[in-house]
Amino acid sequence: MPLKVLGGTFVVPIEINGAITLDFVVDSGAADVAVTADVAATLMRAKTLGQTDFIGRQTYILADGSELPSDIFIIRSLKIGDHRIEKVRGSVVPPLAPFYLGSRFFVILGRGLSTI
């Protein structure tokens, strides 16, 4: 995995739905992959994310105990290095939040599965 250190945090470049590549923070405490609303909008403009990819809403409990309601969607593909995984659960977070790779991503990658 092509890890980088940015400000004392591990990040990894991930290609989302074959459309854009962004640095994601490795966060084993997070459950899902998180992208900001503007990234979700960019994916929709690129026609790699549509309304049918959204599967509901979930409220996450953050490390500080606060609650964050988020839209949940299925990311069609994530590419890390030479590995591509498909149908990964993602959530939409506020505009200034970092992009997170949660534990679900690493479970899929570690098992070599294409979906979870």
Image (cartoon, rainbow, N blue to C red):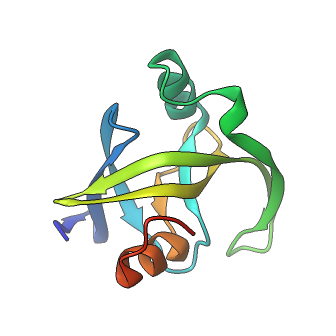
Q: Position of residue 87 (x, y in %)?
A: 53, 55
Left or right: where 13 falls relative to 35: left
Look at 45% across and 55% down and name the residue there: 86
In this view, 19 is above or below 113: above
Left or right: where 53 falls relative to 8: right
Q: Position of residue 42 (x, y in %)?
A: 48, 23
5 and 16: which is toward the camera = 16
Look at 65% across and 42% down and name the residue there: 94
Look at 29% across and 70% down and name the residue there: 10
Q: Is residue 105 visible?
A: yes
- Quarter occupied by the N terminus: bottom left
In this view, 11 is above or below 74: below
Look at 83% across and 60% down and name the residue there: 59
Quadrant of res 40? top right
In the picture as drawn, the residue positioned furthest to the front comes out as: 114
72 and 59: which is toward the camera = 72
60 and 79: which is toward the camera = 79
Left or right: where 16 falls relative to 83: right
Left or right: where 98 falls relative to 7: right
- Quarter occupied by the C terminus: bottom right
In this view, 23 is above or below 113: above
